[in-house]
Image (cartoon, rainbow, N blue to C red):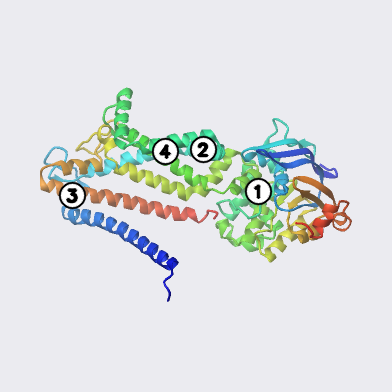
Amino acid sequence: MRWSWRKVEETFFRCLMMAAVVLVMLILLWILLTILVRGVPALDWEMVSRTPRGGFYLGKSGGILNAILGSLFLTLGATLAAFVAGLPVALYLTCFRGDSSRTAAFIRTVLDVLWGIPSIVYGAFGFVLMIWLGLRASLLGGMLAVALLILPIMIRGMDEVIRLVPRELYDSAYALGATKMETAFRVVIRQAAPGILSTVLIALGRGMGDAASVLFTAGYTDALPSSLLEPVATLPLAIFFQLGTPFPEVQERAYASALLLTILILVISGVARWLIRRYARQVVR
Amino acid sequence: MTGEHVIHARDLNVYYGQLHVLKDITVAIPRSKITAIIGPSGCGKSTLLRSFNRLLETMDNVRLAGSVRLGPQDVYAPGVDVTLIRKKMGLLAQRPFPLPMSIYENVAFGPRLHGIRNRRALDRLVEDNLQLTGLWSEVRDRLHTPAVELSIGQQQRLCLARGLAVEPEVILADEPTSALDPQSSRRIEECFRHLKDRYSIVMVTHILRQARRLADYILFLYMGELVEHGPAEQMFNAPRRELTREYVQGVIS
């Protein structure tokens, strides 16, 4: 067998690819192992079924049900708000504006800039907004900040997947006498449904995992969420506060919280994946 | 509505940006006949077809001058409801694009848009139009399965049935068999033959033999100009223009 230069090149890049795969897998495994090894010992039924006891905010006993529910409510609310606000924008960019539209290009640029803004800035902005609205740190305030944080992700993500809808599908609907609106809502959304769902999922994951945006806006509390206008605990902040204590027992619980946050996101993405597969059956390829 | 011709184009000019793609097209399309638009690739066949049902204007940078009439109706008159114009002209594309829904929903989609809600009436429409395209016996047991699970030939006939369900006067077909295998192509051609008594069919094709087999009337386009048009017999056997003769004999392509 002759070793030509092309062959060397091919082998070299194959090795590089393998190395990249291995590296990515290793990092993932390492993260998962770390939170498993450190979190599992501290994890018990109390952790997910009780609120903190024996100490302000974090406690050495009790659980973090307050943060689990708080994160769920806050993120679901924020995701829903961002979806409802974002979908029309994404449809406007794709179905109502042509590919060569300057307005659309400008809006996309603005959204990309917004996407890049650090979440602490959204937190600070949300804080200003809250004061202006006369709110204090609360579930509603947190939802607002997180909704703003994930809005650009939501819009640009949906925009990209809707742009993949073939031109001919629009033509098919138009040719049957559908208006742009009917085409957008009855055909394009269905075709893009799997992609839209993944986008919602990505936005939701980002929102659920973000600590900085809820730091000032949602506050923190030992109590279970009871009202939109009361402060609410969230998992990222629970981890932050638990890790920040000088007590090793409480620090251990931070890893249990991290584990719970990961499991929560895994469960949500599992459900979403199942939904995506169901929708994907209808889609034109 | 009767009359010898169904579509009249007059001094039709179309520009894509600076590119002049259709030049001074004036032609009348006969009613209840199959009209084939032939010509080499890029000569403006599809553009002409799409100018009839105003699908061109959904693209960027397109400018159109001149007029198109569907029967007595000026297609481009200001204030005309474009959805009603398009509804009167069914479209069949090069590759079938079923809507992302079930077979039943595909056919019922158009009628629903235009206000038919009654379940019985919809069932009826779905069955009738699937019958018309010979698809009913093949899909009656799986009407509620996704349309994309049909074979590509079946999909194309579904798209035809979907278009027929809104009761158009004209069927516009843009190389409707180019993605299909020979057998499926033949079935589409059969459909056209059956349908031409009730509908006027305008098809773009680059397959000369298909035009010979099907067409009653031929439009020959070359580089955006309508070189010649006439009954198929005359166009194939005794064309008036030298260019037409060369094209139909396969000298140029």
Q: Give me the disc on residue A112.
A: 4
Are the residues flagged by discs 4 and 1 in contact, CB closer than 8 Å? no
Q: Residue A250 at what x, y percent from top left?
A: 14, 46
At label 2, the amino acid type is Leu
Same subunit: marks 4 and 1: no
Q: Residue A21 at what x, y percent from top left?
A: 34, 60
What quarter of the picture does the N terminus of chain B occupy? top right
Cα distance, mark 4 to mark 2?
14 Å
Q: Nearer the viewer, mark 1 or mark 3?
A: 3
Q: Residue at x 39, y 35 (%)?
A: A114
- SS category of the residue bearing label 4: helix
At label 4, the amino acid type is Asp
- SS category of the residue bearing label 3: helix
Q: Which residue position is annotated with label 1?
A: B121
Q: Chain of mark 4?
A: A
Q: Which residue position is annotated with label 3?
A: A46
Pick whichever, A270 or A38, lies toward us. A38
At label 3, the amino acid type is Glu
Dot placed on the residue nearer the N-terminal end, 4 or 2: 2
Cα distance, mark 4 to mark 1?
49 Å
Q: Which residue position is annotated with label 2?
A: A93
Label 4 crowd bin: few (<14), some (14–19), many (20+), radius 10 Å? some
Q: Residue B66 at what x, y percent from top left?
A: 76, 35
Q: Residue at x 81, y 47 (%)?
A: B227
At label 1, the amino acid type is Ala
Q: Quadrant of residue B128?
A: bottom right
Q: Nearer the viewer, mark 4 or mark 2?
A: 4
Cα distance, mark 2 to mark 3?
48 Å
Q: Residue A106 at what x, y percent from top left?
A: 48, 34
A169 up-or-down from A2: above or below:
above
